[in-house]
Amino acid sequence: MKRLLTFLLIFLSSSSTLTLRADIKQGEKIYTEMCVLCHGLAGEGWDWEKKAAKPPVPVPNLKEVIPERSDEYLQAVIKEGGRAVGLSEFMPALGFNLSDLEIQHLISFLRSLNQKTQEEGALLKKHQSGQVKHLVYSPLPEWNGFGQFSSFIQPVLFKGASASNRFNYYFSKSKYFDINNWQESILLAHQQDVGNSPGNQRIGGFFPHAITLGDFNSDGNTDFAVPASASQTLTVLISGNSGDIISNQHLHVGEGPTWVTSTDLNQDGHLDLVTTNTGAGSLSLYYGNGKGDFNGRTDIEDIHGPSCVVAGDFNNDGIADLAVAQAGISKVVVLTNDSTGLPKKSYTVDVERGPHIMDGVDLNLDGIPDLVVGSLGSHTLSIILAKGDGEFKEANLVKTGRFPHYRTYGDWNGDGNLDLAVVVAGEESIEVYRGDGLGNFKMLSRHETGVNPHGLTSGDFNQDGNLDLAVSNRTSGGITIFLGKGNGNFENTSSIYTGNDGIAIANGDFDGDGAIDLAMVSASSHSLLFYRGDGKGGFNPW
């Protein structure tokens, strides 16, 4: 009996210690870094009535669902992703990014979002007893060719008749939706009807996340590669002479692909593709044959929460190397390539907490690409200049607004130095910085965008010799155009309403008419959408 009491005292003491170690403030910090952009500042999820661009799957209100879930359940979801508990793969596995203790911090914060746990948490139980009628739940059985999406629909609660009518209103707009057989058609209803025009291209994967351009079949036309983070696929779209997509193929990659870049790894003169697989903690490499086909998949393992990869000849040996942002350990790992075409990990560079998007760009014009790393956790840009021998100097930090996302570069003020512009999602704006050619940047101006801006690209849209900017807004569903004046200032001249959430955006003369066009990745419609430029700064759906 004495031994039993001793064991119980030790167990209770350990349990209390674990509870006490959970820090709500630390959990709030982690939530702000990794969860807020999808779940909202207060865990409210996506309000379907107020958001112009709908998410690809319903994002639940955490205040309603958290009280119903055990700590063990939440630990599994956060660490291993939605698939671990039979929910959507849209919820990524964060185990590569967070330690078990950090997950406990996050759970403690989630539980603090709402103290009315019994009242709101009982809603799901009421549904189980038949008291609540409007609960839409999946996974659904495989249906035609869309079975790959069947596990991606999460539980979502529609409270009351008005909510049910709202549900009917949104989904009855889809030509695929059958109000009398919604259980089989809701899956297709989540795939917005973007039309059948050549400018609306379904990528064939769920939740496309990024885009890279390149001539993959050596015909002189721009082609596209788009990773779908919830489908473990990379879609390659081949364009024809008029800019229309003439073929596509789907490459299987590791779990949770969030980024893709193209480069010639094996020095055969053809572009290869590299994806970061955040869920798998790996890179997937595919080697191109110059005819639009890719093969010879090779995975590089043990990459901690890879969020972005860039290619560049960092050691000046004429062979493309790789640099990978590792969100899990707040480091950039450099992979040095050789004649084998298989880059190998060589060393790491420390960056600020929560590295997200990284660029490889020659800031000081010495012929060697430098690195610019945006960190969501610290709201900073790490400017890391290359030494030319494969190593990098200590990072120079630039403080930005909240949640820096995509960036673009150009000489905004005509002084011969590269400047940069960065999207700051938490400020609903872009910030423009003047560069001095030595890796130092000073803010020039800030310009308001739509709600939750993400993507950013630059080009001379109105053909006046000055670089302009285009910003894709994820939540308000549009593209904001800023025309450059050549002195570092920009004028907000127009907005394109798309009705789709813009994750990433790129530009080029895709149809060969001499005017710059835009290509935008939309998660909610699982598509790559094109907008034809008129050469005067205006754009229209393709």
Image (cartoon, rainbow, N blue to C red):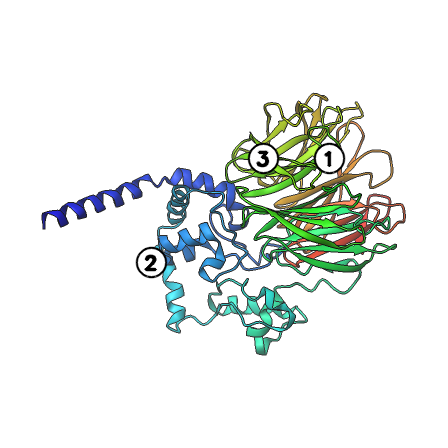
Give the residue pinned by disc 2. 118
**The C terminus is located in which quarter?**
bottom right
Give the label, 3 or 1, closer to the camera: 1
Give the label, 2 or 1, closer to the camera: 1
Is residue 126 placed above or below 521 in the rendered structure? below
Residue 333 badge: 3
Residue 285, percent across and down? 66, 48
> Callout 1: few (<14), some (14-19), or many (20+) C-alpha neighbours within 10 Å?
many
Asked if residue 353 shows in the view, the reply is yes
- Say which label, 3 or 1, has the lower sequence index: 1
Residue 61 badge: none
Q: Nearer the viewer, residue 6 or 530?
A: 6
> Callout 3: few (<14), some (14-19), or many (20+) C-alpha neighbours within 10 Å?
many
Residue 287, percent across and down? 72, 49
Give the residue pinned by disc 1. 319
Residue 366, percent across and down? 75, 23
Question: In the image as oriented, which residue stretches furthest toward the left?
Answer: 1
Amino acid on which the number 1 mark rests in the picture: Ile
Which residue is located at x 71 percent, y 54 percent? 295
User: Horizontally, is 39 left or right of 178 in the view?
Assistant: left
Question: In the image as oriented, which residue stretches furthest toward the right?
Answer: 513
